[in-house]
Image (cartoon, rainbow, N blue to C red):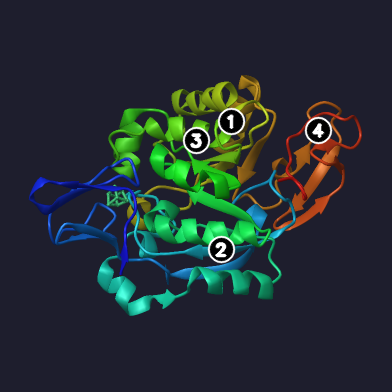
Amino acid sequence: MHEAMLYDRLPGSRVRCNICQWRCTIGPGKLGVCRMRQNIDGTLYTLNYAEVSSAAVDPIEKKPLFHFFPASTVFSLGTWGCNFRCRDCQNWQISQATLSDLERGSQRLSPEESIELIKRYNCQGIAWTYNEPSIWFEYTLDGAKLAKANNLYTVYVTNGYITEEALDEIGPYLDAYRVDVKGFTDALYRDLAKVHRWRGILDVAKRAKERWDMHVEVVTNIVPTMNDDDEQLEGIATWIRDELGELTPWHVTRFYPQYEMRHLPPTPLSTLEHAYEIGRRVGLRFVYLGNVPGHESENTTCYSCGNLIVQRIGYETRILGLDGSRCRFCGAELDIKTAPWR
Ligand code: SF4
């Protein structure tokens, strides 16, 4: 077991965890909401440090990140547990895991070993993904420091519920922040993710970009009857434009029935295309449809001259028109990160 970071000791051997916005107060012997942090005699321990549920070599486009080292490969790691209870979760077997699931199915991988694997598989960076990365914050921090020392890029694929102080710890070592914004009302977050106070997600995403200069992309998985109305979609798109900037990619992805939402149909293509239109009408330069292989909106087209910049067919990516971060044809700034950039 590994002692946790960023917690307060409270009277009566209780502790308060400050890794995510739940800020759980945890009594002796008890676990936090994520089920992966335990108070033992007044000391908070993380139970999943270096405990890996899933590891893979992925195209960076699979995260999805479309404007961050396009066509590179990323070593992807996930652990067990989550601080959300999303009813549409694609990875619920690991995100909703208990300690006994971890004990049955886990593989230990130290931060040093993860760097060795990145090099062996010739990846350009590392992503903590598949479940919420802040749930094993201390491990991702150690891994991120090592990755930067080895000239590798680092990525969080996150629900965005990390606190500002945890973000500030890892900020110097984290390059990309791929954040879900699931909707834009209290009711949506309460019904879909069982989270009551969600607006801090927006503040922390803005801080990732402004204070730490991270590359930020936003994903909204559109679930029929849940977050497919114009109020949600316009709210998200307008917030991205105003707070992250019009060049920030917005991925609107197709939901497939799973976990507690098997009774709903997959998202109709017309709904995704409507979301695309809303994003473009609001002023976002780059809106992408996800989980719709072969759709032309997977490509990056220059908003200024209309030329094809990056072609994507499934996970086949061809860079056709980049000069650094700019359009090779007209010079427009596209804010696409390519090596070397940091
Ligand atoms: S990481 Fe979040 S959910 Fe887990 S114990 Fe800390 S505050 Fe609670």
242 or 341, which lies in front?
341
Q: Which is closer to the viewer, label 4 or label 2? A: 2
Q: Quadrant of residue 237?
A: top right
Disc with the residue nearer the chain's start (2 vs 1) = 2
Name the residue tied to disc 2: 76
Who comes first in sequence, dot 3 or dot 4? 3
Chain-order first, disc 4 or disc 2: 2
Q: Secondary structure at mark 3?
A: helix
- In the displayed structure, would residue 100 be above or below residue 297? below
The 10 Å Cα crowd at callout 2, few under 14, some 14 to 19, many 20 or more, is many
CB under 8 Å between discs 3 and 1: no
Mark yes or no: residue 233 visible.
yes
Q: Which mark is residue 274?
A: 1
Q: CA distance from mark 2 to mark 1?
A: 32 Å
Q: CA distance from mark 3 to mark 1?
A: 25 Å
- From the image, tell me which residue sits under label 3: 205
Is residue 258 something that shows in the picture? no
- Give how far across and how far down residue 328 sits, in percent: 89, 37
